[in-house]
Image (tube, rainbow, N blue to C red):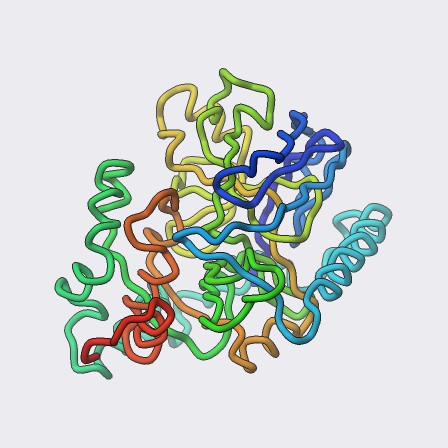
Amino acid sequence: MHSTVVRAISVRPAARIAAARAPKPSAQPPARPQFSRGARNNNDVFLQKGTHRSRLVASRAEKQSDGAGEADAEKPKKASEDVAKDEDDEMKAEAGAGDAERPDDVVGDVEKAPALDDDVAPALEGDWRDFRAMLISQEKGKDELVDEDEIAAASGPNLELLMQQNPKLAKDKPWAHRIGAPEKGCLLLAAADEFTLGQQYFHQAVILLLEHHEKGSMGVILNRPTQYNMGYVSGQSDGPFAENALYFGGDVGDGTVSFLHGSDKVQGSAEVLPGVYLGGYDSACELVKKEEVDANEFKFFARYCGWAPGQLKRECERGVWYPVACSKQLALKQVIQLPKPLWREILELCGGELKSAAARAYGEEDDAN
């Protein structure tokens, strides 16, 4: 699997970023961070730590319309610390080894791509996720995975808001379906009864999985906007992304900021799933300044979620997370004051038992599937 290229933006020490949408009266504003070009140019499987580190500490998440969240029975806080320690050891080793000792899994897609004369089924030459979705729709006896009536019921109010915020993205039809195991580019939706006592920022969380392989997994929480924007935390009130909201991405990776977007014009970015890209900060700044892309198409995240090797697979097998494949619209849209929480919208698009779980979580009777 081709390794995701991640750009990290380091921040000044003592910065505190609250995970709740609105701060408590006693909450202290964060110190303004500085952006490190050196850190931004370091590529690795995991987010790099900046030269000027800070602790981006998430305050206890308030229960929002988009949900809150907490830990599982096997103390994920300790697992997160293990991931951070493994990350430190790996970076130290790579600092001396250089690019000559890159791990075997960091291989270009071109090198693994089949030759033109290989026996490849025509249906698989495009995006295999679309092919899988087509097979699932056929199993359900449908022409499409999610029909117009189902989209209207699950996503109608959110689509109306998206049409105002990002008409281009709103044209992408929303769809989602459950898959058997986590994979790079999928969503992880917290099970309805998980994370109610600890780590509540994971309750009803929707996580985009940026990397998943034998060395571990990482992702960002899509539905935890903070009360801060990039202009405030960067100290650049006139910067190209000054008005962009900053999301709380997870509980790992002190001092890191990453971002997602849907533009293939951004150089230095990596595709996470079709139409969804990660990184490319310098190029993104230039394109926004030239008005070639809209700043609203970018989502910024402080910190990220991390799992040790095999941990995420075990959690999914225990039912902590629902792995879900989805359209790019659901991964990229802004999640601020949505008429319907993103977690619920996606479960309803999946249908079946997941739709029933969403109804039960909100104390409602589920309609016929």
Number of marks present in the image shown: 0
> Which residue is at the front of the view, 111 or 233?
233
- Residue at the image position 18 percent from the left and 69 percent from the top: 144
| Residue 4 visible in the picture | yes
The location of residue 159, given as percent across then percent down, is 23, 49
The location of residue 46, given as percent across then percent down, is 66, 52
> Which residue is at the front of the view, 332 or 315?
315
Where is 59 relative to 348, above or below?
above
Where is 363 relative to 162, above or below?
below
- Residue at the image position 50 percent from the left and 35 percent from the top: 227
Where is 201 relative to 317, above or below?
above
- Residue at the image position 67 percent from the left and 50 percent from the top: 44
Left or right, residue 35 beside residue 329:
right
Q: Quadrant of the C terminus?
A: bottom left
Left or right, residue 16 beside residue 346:
right
Where is 45 relative to 254, above or below?
below
The location of residue 56, given as percent across then percent down, is 67, 41
Left or right, residue 202 beside residue 274:
right
Q: Residue furthest front?
A: 25
| Residue 123 visible in the picture | no
The location of residue 229, given as percent across then percent down, is 50, 30
Q: Residue furthest top?
A: 238
